[in-house]
Image (cartoon, coloured by chain):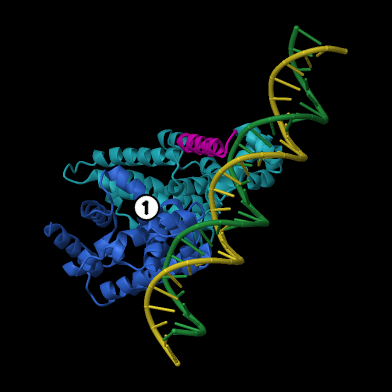
Chain colours: A blue, B cyan, C green, D yellow
Amino acid sequence: MRPISEEDLTARARIRDAAMALFAERGVKATTIRGVAEAAGVSPGLVQHHFGTKEELRQACDEYVLSYVREQVTTGITDHNLEKPEYIENVYRSAPPLMHYLGRALVDGSPGAAAMFDELVNVTEQHLSHEDRPEADHRARATVLTAMKLGITVLHEHVSRALGTDLYEPQGALRVGKAQLDLIRPEFLGRELFEQARAGLEKFEGDR
Amino acid sequence: MRPISEEDLTARARIRDAAMALFAERGVKATTIRGVAEAAGVSPGLVQHHFGTKEELRQACDEYVLSYVREQVTTGITDHNLEKPEYIENVYRSAPPLMHYLGRALVDGSPGAAAMFDELVNVTEQHLSHEDRPEADHRARATVLTAMKLGITVLHEHVSRALGTDLYEPQGALRVGKAQLDLIRPEFLGRELFEQARAGLEKFEGDR
DNA sequence: TAGCTTACAATACAAACGTATAGAGTGCTG
DNA sequence: CAGCACTCTATACGTTTGTATTGTAAGCTA
């Protein structure tokens, strides 16, 4: 798969990418249309031409990220690609800026990100309910698990600094992934999924 | 201990509290001096008189929260007050706005919050190193544990929504606390601390 | 080729914002 | 009582920001 260079993209896509990066780094309010335009190498007017208002630009970023995440979850988990190297490779190349944006959007108050959070909680809750422990508070467990997972994304700057390695570099992702598996009770996640995740990590580690 | 009503505070304290609340809810950039002044019931000029610039106001909030957290950690953990009801009661009454601010500050890029994160990682790492498993990546584990804990604070809005209960109400805090204990391997935290936390939670539950 | 749509830039403008400045009221101190 | 310090308000100023408007060039279509 050829790597897509930023210059080959249409101006609209470049604007969207620049907006995602700036929204993620500084937040929506601190990001200016002029700043986005400069980062994308276009005039401020063009940003307006393609996206109308700043709010619509943010919505476009939301929709882009959300459709991406949904697609990756589908092709990754539902289609059982979690251990395929090309899938992992592709995710690690394309995901970081999107995850960066998603993390910030969760804090900045994007409706789309909130909806995605709820979706993830529901999926997790359903998964946990299959383990037959009807007395357990599956809702709370699913919520905490989701928040912990996403919390690492939201705090990735601090995680990277504490680790001395960028979380989005393979090394950092590997260390964090393993630490997460060390931390969580296997029976909580379900043995099957737990082993699958561990196998994926180890295969990924062997590849480098 | 008498409850401190907001009107009894000095104007300076009211401004600081209002700023913390707005910074936490909207972020620093989206918060205006005029907004802080209105929320505190004073003129915008007074904000400037007491704190100079917006940046200095943010630093004052940082210092206030940080000294509070450090104090609570000291009197709570070091002095072994974790199970005393009046300590817990006091924390649950005074902590929420401060934690709310801290969570936002971590994302908004406050140097003080970053320093606090690093401190917590170091304390946790030291704790983990006492368990003799020299081959384990204690640094990564401490980082992930810290990020997960704080991640729940940062995402508390979403956690509360998914739970249907405010995380900062006793009910919500209880459900989340128990779910966290269910999720984490006890031997990871150290049996002693784990049991201490569980005992504190159960005593807290009994009190209501 | 005439006409229309699309992609882009440049300029303009009103609102919001941080902050500087001036001044009023009050209490303390000599 | 004079003078100073402190708290607080009101106003003003320059900048930044989102966005509206206008203009230009290129490509498509009939």
> Main SS type for the magenta part?
helix
The image shows residue D18, relative to residue A81, as above or below, that is: above
* Bounds of the magenta segment: B52-72
- Compare residues A11 and B45 and report the one nearer the observer: A11
Q: Is disc 1 placed on a helix, strand or loop?
A: helix
- Compare residues B118 and B72 and report the one nearer the observer: B118
Is residue B97 part of the magenta span, yes or no?
no
- Compare residues B165 and D4 and report the one nearer the observer: D4
**Residue at 35% over, 70% down:** A68
- Compare residues D19 and A73 and report the one nearer the observer: D19
* Quadrant of the snapshot with the N terminus of chain A: bottom left
Chain to which the residue tagged by mark 1 belongs: B
Asked if residue B155 lies left or right of residue A13, the reply is: right
Residue B80 screen position, x and y as percent: 43, 36
The image shows residue B24, relative to residue B176, as above or below, that is: above
Q: State which quadrant residue B14 falls in.
A: top right
Residue A165 screen position, x and y as percent: 25, 46
**Residue at 37% over, 69% down:** A124
Residue B157 screen position, x and y as percent: 50, 58
The image shows residue B53, relative to residue A98, as above or below, that is: above
**Residue at 31% over, 50% down:** B144
Q: Which residue matches tag 1?
A: B148
